[in-house]
Each structure stands twice: as C-alpha cells, then as structure tokens.
Image (cartoon, rainbow, N blue to C red):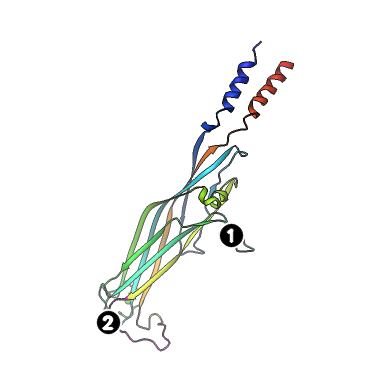
Amino acid sequence: MKKPAPQVLAGLLVAGLPALAAAGTITHSVPFSYSPLVGDGVIFPVIQGFDTLGGTRRLDAVTFAFDHQFTIEMFVESTGPTAVQTGDFSLNFAYITLFLLGTVDPLTGARGGGGGPPLIGPGAFFIDNFSADLAAYDGIPGNDGPDSTRRTFADAYTHTQTYTGAEQDVLDAVTDVGALTTVYGGFTELFFAWKNDPNWPVPPGGAPSYPTDAALWVSFSNFVHSGTIHVTYAYSDVPAPTTALPLAAAGLLGLRRRR
Ligand SMILES: [Ca+2]
C-alpha cells in the first residue's frame, strides 16, 4: 500500500508558494454594426463579464480595443443667389461615441456617477474644415447640380484603453456579471462658419426655410459605424489559504486509509 506522506508534502509545497500566483488573460471579441442616423442610433453589444470562479482569481485590468470603421455621405447644397468658393465657408462635423458598461435603469435614468454603469469614450469620427465651390442655386432642390456637392468620408482605426484598479468602478462593472448587455452609440456636433460671408438676404423670421431662402444646407446619409470590440481581462489567481490545501489532502488520505 502506498504511503501518504509524499502527497501531503506536495500539498504543502504548492500552498507555500503564493508569490508565484498564476496570472493570465482572457479576450472576448464582439463585432458590431449600426447606423447612428437610424432609429435611436444605439446598439446593445453583449460582452462576457470576467468570472472570478468563486473568488479564486482577481481582475487586475480590463482593456477595451475598438476596431472602428466609419463611413458617411454628406450632401451640401446652396440656395444662395451667388456662387461661393472653396474657403468661403468652413464645415466641421464630429461624431463622438460613448460606451456604457451596462444598461441605464429605466426607472431612475441613472447614469455613471449616479450609481449607474460607468461611461467611457472609445473613439470619434471627424470631418474637419470642409469647404467647396458651389454655384448659385439652380432652382432644383436636392439634385446633384452645380449648386451642390456630395462627398463620402471614411475612417478606420483602433482605439485602445486600459482600466486598472485606479478605475475600480470599471472593473466592478464587468466582474461576475455573466453576459453583460452594454449600450453603444454617440452624439453628433455640426459647426458652420462663413470665412467670407456673401451677405445673402436674411429672411424676416431669421431662420431660413428650405429651399426658398438663401442658405447652405447640409444633410447626411448612409452613415455606418462598424467594427469589433475586443475585451481583454488581465487577472491573477488568488492564493489559497496556506493551511487549507494540506489539511484537505490529509483528510482525503485519511478517509482512504479507513476504507
Ligand atoms: Ca440644386
């Protein structure tokens, strides 16, 4: 019959090495695609939360890598009585994305900071300082005429952010939650400025009406934001209490001996 002593010793050795606690990483990848201009302009990606396996491992950091692809079509039309040149006006567009690590409580509307899930900003899309030559209004609204221009803009890049214990609320939001439904969307900003104002007549009410009043008009279509969210958990194993393993091993061996 085998002697139990060597196995008990092995148990003691393992339990006596907490400084060599194992560490590892887990990555989940979730593709997404939506149009910010359709419906509410948000989607609900489901990511896998970090599982502590009953408290035997601890989340040290979470990294969100967003592979972004943006494409948008912009249509600019003049209903002004005179032509404008490139550089006479400047148009800036921004779409700033926001990623909410959970769903907003429908009753309280609680958001990050108010006890709701944390909110992070993983990337944006910009059209910078756009301008164009536009002829005087051709009398036809919405056509591809000399008074308008249609341009497609696109961008693709990866944005990476790592959160550690300094942002414990982010770690907590993804720990032991199973499949976590998130909210991803954003908001748009549009800035327009005349650099060389043609001084078109201002309508009596102030705000121009399309297409009867003189103005520049901007519209967007086919706006698609797609890509992949890579969530990487970096964790370390939590050392077991130093006495639990040898006692358990000894107890098991003791039972076997009695049989
Ligand atoms: Ca036109």
- Residue 104: mark: 1
Q: Secondary structure at mark 2?
A: loop
Q: Which residues are magenta?
A: 194-208
* Viewer-nearest residue: 165 or 81: 165
* Residue 160 on image: x %, y %: 42, 50
User: Residues under labels 1 and 2: Cα distance?
Assistant: 49 Å
Residue 1 is a magenta residue: no
Position of residue 70 relative to residue 201, above or below, is above
**Label 1 vs 2, first from the N-terminus:** 2
Q: Quadrant of residue 130?
A: bottom left
- Residue 82: mark: 2
Residue extending furthest toward the top: 1
In terms of image quarters, where does ligand 1 lie? bottom left
* Viewer-nearest residue: 200 or 80: 200
The amino acid beneath tag 2 is Thr
Give yes or no for contact between labels 1 and 2 (Cβ–Cβ under 8 Å).
Answer: no
